[in-house]
């Protein structure tokens, strides 16, 4: 078997489970339906905003790897998507965000009160999907991820005030905020296939490694260039402490560190000052350090998968791991 160590598009990676993904999309759309016209309009609007379908792909590939794809797998994927979509709707209210994926957010179109209620509705739909089908193990896995995501957001808010986050705290934040969701996808897939608790935990850890690599890759994007060749720096503008910046601050003098933190805290809306911070990180080895850490987590994910027999589902997961670390956006 040829291991898929070359870059492939998500559409190519998805081919072994394309039929299952198509069926899932129909089931997921149905799971969001409501008899209340306004709710139905909004949930269908949300459905149209679905992203790259990476989360369901992780669920289905993990199920295939650990046994077989079945109705429980579809429910696991729908549960993840329902609770995740609910969290995004609530996040947009918290962040006062007007856009998501290039479209108006729910709160921008229907105001905060409606958005909060829609998020609550989606959470309830996820709970009912689980309880009505006796999917208590899946509900526990995904609910734990939502708990972790909330804790990660609050931990970031708490620590970001001083803009002096240590590397271990950074990993704790992204493990909770980002990695926990992908971990729940892989664990849910394994669980739906009837895998043992040991295997479910192994797949959860596999997903966590991918999630950590995924977030570090996002950190690196912030120190690149936009379409017209200007530094991006969106995280700096939002006063987020990411791994390249954390490393650079730890490797410089106390006075330079204070100066950079001052720029992030007080001049984050000034393009020239943001560019100065980006150049500081680049010249300090922050990007190389973060890249090495990302590749470390990638390899740890590969090592976990190496324990499983070769098949098309394992190939799909290997390709997804590569995609998370080699994508260009």
Image (cartoon, rainbow, N blue to C red):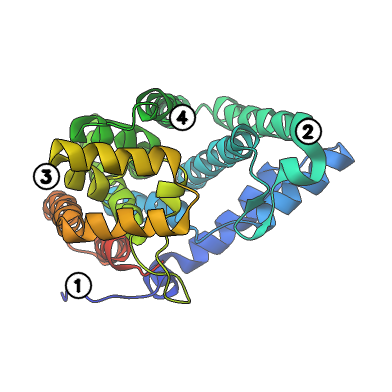
Q: Indicate the quadrant containing the C terminus: top left, top right, bottom left or bottom right.
A: bottom left
- Foreground mark, 3 or 2, reads 3
Name the residue tied to disc 4.
Answer: 146
Residue at the disc numbered 1:
5
Question: Whole-percent x and y of residue 61?
Answer: 35, 56
Hey, which quadrant is residue 174 in on the image?
Answer: top left
Cβ atoms under marks 3 and 2 closer than 8 Å: no
Residue linked to disc 2: 114
Q: How far apart are the two marked residues, 3 and 4, measured between alpha carbons?
A: 35 Å
Q: Which residue is painted at 79% across and 46% down in the image?
A: 109
Q: Is residue 67 visible?
A: no
The picture quadrant where one finds residue 232 is bottom left
* Residue named by callout 3: 251
Label 2 CA crowd tier, 10 Å (few <14, some 14–19, many 20+): some
Nearer-the-camera pick, 118 or 204 = 118
Q: Earlier in the sequence, mark 3 or mark 1?
A: 1
297 w.r.t. 232: above or below: above
């Amino acid at each position: 078997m040829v291991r898929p160590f070359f870059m492939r598009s998500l559409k190519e990676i998805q081919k072994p489970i394309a039929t299952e993904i198509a069926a899932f999309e129909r089931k997921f759309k149905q799971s969001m339906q409501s008899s209340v016209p306004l709710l139905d309009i909004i949930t269908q609007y949300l459905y149209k905003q679905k992203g790259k379908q990476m989360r369901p792909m992780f669920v289905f590939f993990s199920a295939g790897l650990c046994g077989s794809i079945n109705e429980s797998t579809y429910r696991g994927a729908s549960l993840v998507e329902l609770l995740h979509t609910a969290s995004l709707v609530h996040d947009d209210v918290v962040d006062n965000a007007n856009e998501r994926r290039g479209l108006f957010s729910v709160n921008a179109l229907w105001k905060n009160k409606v958005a909060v209620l829609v998020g609550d509705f989606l959470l309830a739909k996820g709970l009912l999907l689980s309880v009505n089908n006796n999917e208590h193990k899946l509900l526990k896995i995904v609910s734990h991820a939502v708990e972790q995501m909330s804790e990660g957001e609050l931990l970031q808010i708490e620590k970001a005030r001083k803009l002096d986050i240590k590397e271990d705290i950074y990993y704790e934040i992204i493990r909770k905020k980002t990695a926990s969701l992908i971990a729940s996808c892989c664990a849910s897939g394994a669980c739906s296939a009837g895998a043992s608790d040991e295997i479910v935990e192994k797949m959860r850890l596999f997903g966590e490694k991918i999630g950590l690599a995924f977030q570090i890759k996002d950190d690196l994007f912030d120190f690149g260039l936009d379409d017209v060749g200007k530094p991006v720096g969106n995280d700096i503008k939002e006063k987020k402490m990411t791994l390249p910046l954390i490393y650079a601050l730890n490797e410089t003098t106390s006075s330079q560190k204070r100066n950079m933190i001052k720029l992030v805290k007080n001049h984050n809306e000034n393009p020239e000052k943001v560019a100065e911070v980006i150049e500081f990180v680049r010249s300090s080895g922050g990007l190389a350090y973060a890249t090495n850490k990302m590749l470390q987590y990638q390899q740890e994910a590969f090592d976990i998968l190496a324990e499983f027999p070769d098949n098309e589902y394992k190939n799909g997961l290997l390709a997804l791991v590569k995609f998370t670390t080699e994508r260009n956006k």
